[in-house]
Image (tube, rainbow, N blue to C red):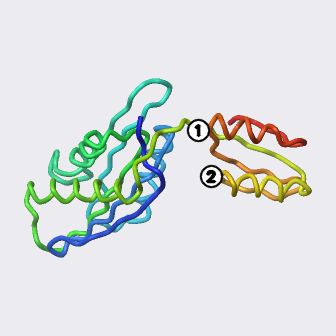
Amino acid sequence: MKTVLKETEIEFEEKKSKFIGYIKPINSIREAENFIKTIKEMHSNATHNCSAYRIIENGQEYYKFDDDGEPSGTAGKPIGEILTTLGVFNVVVVVTRYFGGIKLGAGGLIRNYAKTAKLAVNESGIVDYIEKKIYLIDFSYSKSSEIDRFINENRIEVLEKTFEERVSYKMSLSNIETEKIKEINDIVFIEL
């Protein structure tokens, strides 16, 4: 199974319409819906924020697209078809369009939404999918340098850091990374 490597943003103009493509690797429908909501809020004054996601969650495949006011089948569906054609899963794409005053026609819309999705996927990079889960690790300040070194050496995604009486990191880890980090002594390790 393939997915995309990293969250990325691309942008181009077509007949004065501005297309901005956002792509993110995800692990759940909720994560996809939250990303779409975030982009829509960020570009609340855009003409359209069209989206598609394709995900396997708990062994079930989910596929959803949204034209967000564009003529039916001219935006979300072409975005989704690019994800299918390129064979990527666990990914969400949002394409923001600012209308430039020149109508593109149905064919122009389809081409440009598909182009935005393809550019976003290519920019992000296609990689083999490695299932990851979210964990919280809690440790004393004296372990900080050891934990940070481990994170940097393994290029682990840290979602959140909290510094109080103890340090807590919320991280996305593969099974292999999970086994490695469990070898570090004196940490509290919780699957979320």
State the residue position of label 2. 157
Q: x, y percentage for residue 69?
A: 22, 53
- Residue 49 lies, with reference to residue 1, above or below; the image says below
Quadrant containing the N terminus in the rendered view:
top left
Image-based side of 72 in relation to 134, left or right:
left
Residue occupying the point 25% across, 41% down: 85
Image quarter for residue 116?
bottom left
Residue occupying the point 70% across, 37% down: 178
Q: Are marks 1 and 2 in contact (CB under 8 Å)?
A: yes
Q: Who is closer to the viewer here, 186 or 38?
A: 186
Q: x, y percentage for residue 44?
A: 37, 64
Question: What amino acid is found at the position of numbered circle 1 in the picture?
Answer: Lys
State the residue position of label 1. 132
Q: Who is closer to the viewer here, 117 or 45?
A: 117
Image quarter for residue 73?
top left
Other residues around mark 1 within 10 Å, as few (<14) / some (14–19) / many (≥20): some
